Amino acid sequence: MTEVVNIRHEHASIREWEVRIEQLLEGSARDAAVFNVNEDDDREYDAIFLGGGGGGRFGAAYLRAMGGRQLIIEQWPFLGGSCPHNACVPHHLFSECAAELMLQRTMSGRLWFRDMTDVRASIKDVVDVFRRGRVGPHAIMNYQSKEQLDLEYVLNARGTIIDAHTVEVAGRRFRAKNLVLGLGARAQELHCPGADLKGVFNYATLVEDLDYEPGDTVVVVGGSKTAVEYGCFFNATGRRTILVVRSQLLKTITDDETRGYVVDRMRDQGVEILEGALVDRIEAGADGRACAIHIKTSKGIERIATDFVFHALGETPNSEMPAAALGVKLGAKNEVLVNSQLQTSVPNVYAIGDLIGGPMEMFKARKSGVYAARHIMGEAIEYQPKAWPDFLHTHYEVSWMGLSEQEARARYKDIITIKMPPDTPDGLNVALPASDRTMLYAFLEPKMSGFQKLILDAATRRVVGAFHVGYGAKDAFQYLNHLMKQGLTIDQLGDMDELFLNPTHFIQLARLRAGNRTLRNL
Ligand code: KPC
């Protein structure tokens, strides 16, 4: 029988939330449902948000801010969903380690940098750092949602959909005018003999289950963002890292030249990339843990000894319950189908976030939640994720927006590019770009100092695409993308005020060319 505690009139600090969440996750209170429900409010709920990840939390917050009444029901003992628990936050931690380790290895023995020749960083230590620290962000989510956003929620108990207006949780039924489904997605399974062995991980099981130090060879299955992000971290720790990719690595970077720079630098770091390769089976050792993986390529089957296999094959929406309970229509990838008001095929039932399919990104989760809330509260809205800026991490941060050079050439008659390093006989071996956190590379290993490219339509002088490999440009791309959609020209870009060398050189390079009546490459 689930114990129920209503904390509505308690006001725990962030630190007190950390302790409570630890108890709820692992300790004495594991089975207690946490109710933060306003028993004094007799209004009907405008919406129950089933799932308190980024979508549910932002949607609920917006609806509350607009004067509505909401309830979030979340099976984990914290809000924020997979982001702080096993997805974005650990990925960013690991990617920061990858960047830091690449710098230390590149500078090894120079300046103040220690000799890194025989240094192998512990994967388990970093995972443990995350595991110990993640209740911090969890606690902030619960505190902020209750004390600052005045949200109602039920945590640590699974909600069951009864009908389009009713959810049961911890033995109690809640009714609302609308239901907003934000049930998220889960890692797709690897299907091959041995896939369930100890030593085979995905992004979620890695941070829950890793209880040994992986050996000197890591095999990553997949060619997506997640595969690359985790693979580059494993590589940076000092392990042989092999990426097994069914088709082509990082197809998501649409600009060939940028993708080439990114993949070449990964190879320089020693990442081995097997394209056109499939997993045949994973072999168990005497201890029951994976001891080798068999890879099928055009050359036949290759056996690679490893005690650590990581797979990243995409995500499957958690649509089973709403499909069974409500009959919401699903798409080909099990995503809940919604219109541009986030409405499902069932009246008064909305769906948001990863549950509605790609892009499974935080901005879409949060925005779709907010747009659903606005529609529920009577606003005429339309939302479809399109033309968003994007990024991934290798050992670098890679950011992009708009059209690749090839796409732009197919669409426009006359395309101009502005690049750093420029096309000169010296190739990449010049000390530019010299930007945020690439200054040491620029001076000591110029080839590694990044790559930047701006793509312009000469006729309108408009920016139609931009690509950046380095650090610190993600923030700029959030705003640049917005400006590009409003018709940003080279003249407007060149008239901005750059801060030092700038995370991107685009402002000053644009200024150098903006005086040309007929634009030219740079
Ligand atoms: C702590 C942090 O910003 C990462 S977790 C974000 C979850 S949420 O704010 O609900 O999107």
Image (cartoon, grey):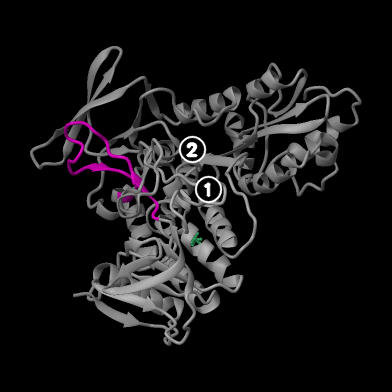
Q: Secondary structure at mark 1?
A: loop
| Magenta stretch, overall SS | loop
Mark number, residue 394: 2
Q: Is residue 94 visible?
A: no
For residue 518, side relative to residue 39 (left or right): right
Quarter that holds the C terminus: top right
For residue 375, side relative to residue 336 (left or right): right
Q: Is residue 433 above or below residue 257?
A: below
Among the 4 quarters of the image, the one containing residue 444: top right
Residue range of the region highlighted in magenta in the rendering: 183-204
Q: Is residue 307 visible?
A: yes
The type of residue carrying mark 1 is Trp
Mark number, residue 443: none
Q: Residue at x 39, y 62 (%)?
A: 134
* Residue 439 counted in the magenta span: no
Quarter that holds the N terminus: bottom left
**Residue 261: percent from the left, percent from the top?**
56, 27
In whole angstroms, how far apart are the C-alphas of marks 2 and 1?
25 Å
Name the foreground residue: 437 vs 149.
149
